Image (cartoon, grey):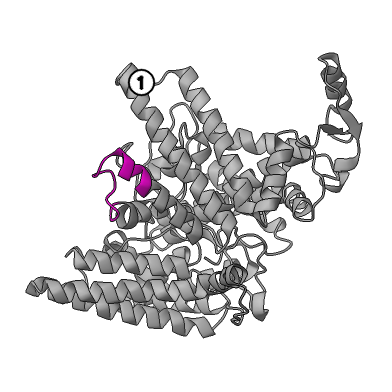
């Protein structure tokens, strides 16, 4: 983002409540599956560079076809939908560019309107038809009915990617018209299912470079290292902390009474599960792409280290934030029409961004919360500027900002995860102490904590009610360890900064170890990868899956 008046937005998620990767009898090929790691990836990689020795266009076509195969593994029927969308948008975009060169403004405006509205109509049908019909029935007392619609994988990603292409064609910013490169840009398998949201100006030129089609061992070592780190984050860390989140939210959905520690354990566990799940996916996507010699944009940059909500949205799902800023917030007028309209545009953008995450009112509430957070953050920045001028924030102010930002984000994630608003309010009420405090007797230091609280005049209970949520009593250890990693350790891009795994080149933290292509780091990377593979007892979906 480009300053405090151009706050980042974004984040995204499907109806993330409970979605089964075997929906309708189809199984998606996830990055954390044996089929992908030992079947698809080696074949796609070897064939790409073998074909590239003889023909670059054929190699690009092969990667395009392999990406379609990757997509079709889940449900072959929807390959036709994806290919049809690609042909339609490429034809419309080409026509818009042609009319732009001719100076035909009216026809150019008509074409972009047809293209964007068609893309949005397709997205609205698959993503929101059931939601709108259900709410209309409740509001109007009608009995309209639609068949259950299975949401195509990645439809939000390839739709937003192509809308940006059409708008940029309208602006005269599209320079390349190679259909294979365009199709590869849209379907490129490292980003197709859960992002990042790609931009044609970043990706299509890379498909034209000679070096992209030459096998380079540094790309292979860097890519495998980043992929292994991401796989470990997903399989070991995110999936490891998940059991401490799901039972709490399930209990809330079923009307069970949750105590203070249970609620905080569940909320923090989900906060960390989502963090390492999305961070792991982002790393895996970057690593996979780098194996093929192609750099993706940075999409995740330690968002829990943010010192404000504006800073958070510059770090969380950065490419979606960029899209919402450039193609929605600015289109609404951005900050060009005064503070009141800027705040209104922020709220509209975040409400729509919340609804984009899933067809449910909890997502709208989540988006609205972050819209309010952003408005308050801008108001505070204005107040601070009036009182303190341009004086930089001190260490105490930064600490308080980080603490309050994290609490606000945790509160929002409760709505993001809960099955409905009632369940979310139940968890939040419990976090506020509405149901009292009970210290599980199997938690570390339970008896000492109980005695300490009694000494200060509190009357906590000591029991086993929480056992249904945390039978092992290890939840606090997981939460503490993952918070320490998220808050204090360098992220993958900082760790790998010397070798710029992404299009951006983040600064490397001073005084901390950084990766280099040596035997020691190879052993460490191999160990992380082996631990992840050994823990892949089942294929668990990514939380940012099937948008």
Task: Please provide percent x and percent y for residue 288.
Answer: 47, 60
Q: Is residue 169 left or right of residue 350?
A: left
Image point (41%, 63%), residue name? 292
Q: Is residue 243 left or right of residue 415?
A: right
> Residue 489, can we see it?
no
> Residue 392, can we see it?
yes
Asked whether 189 or 511 is in front, the reply is 189
Task: Please provide percent x and percent y for residue 460.
Answer: 86, 27
Which region of the structure is painted magenta? 330-345
Image point (33%, 82%), residue name? 87
Task: Please provide percent x and percent y for residue 55.
Answer: 30, 78
Asked whether 186 or 394 is in front, the reply is 394
Q: Among all residues in the image, which is located at the extreme right?
A: 463
Image point (31%, 64%), residue name? 164
Asked whether 270 or 206 is in front, the reply is 270
Task: Please provide percent x and percent y for residue 178.
Answer: 25, 76
Assess whether residue 338 is covered by the magenta stretch.
yes
Q: Is residue 80 above or below residue 302?
A: below
Image point (50%, 52%), residue name? 283
Q: Residues within 10 Å of mark 1 (few under 14, many from 20)?
A: few
Q: Is residue 110 above or below residue 375?
A: below
Name the residue that disc number 1 marks: 392
């Amino acid at each position: 983002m480009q300053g405090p008046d151009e706050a980042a937005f974004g984040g995204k998620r499907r109806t993330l409540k409970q979605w089964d990767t075997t929906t309708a009898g189809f199984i998606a090929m996830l990055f954390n599956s044996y089929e992908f790691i030992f079947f698809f990836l080696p074949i796609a990689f070897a064939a790409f560079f073998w074909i590239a020795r003889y023909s670059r266009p054929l190699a690009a076509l092969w990667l395009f076809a392999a990406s379609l195969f990757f997509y079709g593994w889940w449900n072959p029927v929807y390959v036709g939908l994806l290919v049809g969308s690609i042909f339609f948008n490429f034809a419309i975009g080409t026509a818009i560019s042609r009319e732009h060169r001719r100076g035909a403004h009216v026809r150019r405006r008509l074409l972009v309107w047809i293209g964007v509205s068609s893309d949005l109509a397709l997205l609205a049908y698959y993503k929101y038809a059931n939601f709108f019909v259900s709410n209309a029935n409740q509001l109007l007392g009608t009995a309209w009915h639609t068949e259950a619609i299975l949401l195509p994988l990645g439809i939000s990603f390839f739709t937003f990617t192509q809308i940006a292409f059409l708008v940029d064609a309208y602006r005269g910013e599209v320079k390349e018209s190679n259909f294979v490169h365009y199709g590869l840009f849209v379907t490129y398998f490292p980003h197709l299912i859960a992002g990042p949201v790609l931009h044609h100006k970043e990706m299509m030129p890379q498909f034209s470079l000679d070096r992209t089609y030459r096998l380079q061992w540094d790309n292979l070592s860097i890519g495998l290292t980043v992929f292994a780190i991401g796989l470990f984050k997903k399989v070991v860390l995110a999936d490891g902390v998940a059991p401490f989140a799901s039972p709490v939210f399930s209990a809330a959905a079923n009307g069970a009474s949750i105590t203070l520690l249970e609620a905080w354990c569940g909320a923090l566990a989900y906060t960390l599960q989502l963090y390492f799940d999305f961070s792991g996916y982002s790393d895996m996507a970057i690593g996979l792409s780098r194996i093929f010699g192609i750099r993706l944009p940075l999409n995740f940059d330690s968002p829990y280290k943010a010192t404000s909500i504006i800073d958070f949205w510059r770090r969380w799902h950065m490419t979606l934030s960029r899209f919402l800023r450039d193609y929605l917030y600015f289109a609404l007028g951005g900050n060009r029409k005064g503070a009141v309209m800027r705040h209104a545009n922020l709220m509209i953008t975040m409400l729509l961004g919340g609804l984009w995450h899933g067809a449910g009112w909890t997502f709208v509430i989540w988006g609205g919360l972050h819209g309010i957070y952003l408005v308050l953050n801008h108001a505070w920045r204005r107040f601070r500027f009036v009182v303190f001028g341009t004086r930089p924030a001190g260490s105490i102010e930064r600490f308080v900002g980080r603490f309050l930002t994290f609490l606000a984000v945790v509160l929002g994630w409760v709505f993001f995860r809960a099955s409905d608003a009632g369940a979310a309010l139940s968890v939040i009420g419990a976090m506020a102490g509405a149901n009292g405090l009970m210290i599980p007797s199997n938690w570390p230091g339970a008896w000492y904590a109980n005695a300490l609280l009694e000494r200060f005049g509190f009357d906590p209970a000591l029991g086993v009610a929480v056992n249904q949520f945390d039978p092992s009593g290890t939840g606090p250890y997981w939460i503490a360890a993952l918070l320490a990693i998220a808050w204090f350790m360098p992220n993958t891009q900082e760790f790998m900064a010397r070798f710029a795994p992404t299009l951006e080149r983040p600064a490397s933290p001073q005084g901390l170890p950084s990766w280099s292509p040596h035997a020691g780091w190879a052993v460490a990377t191999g160990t992380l990868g082996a631990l992840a593979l050994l823990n892949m007892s089942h294929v668990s979906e990514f939380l940012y899956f099937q948008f």
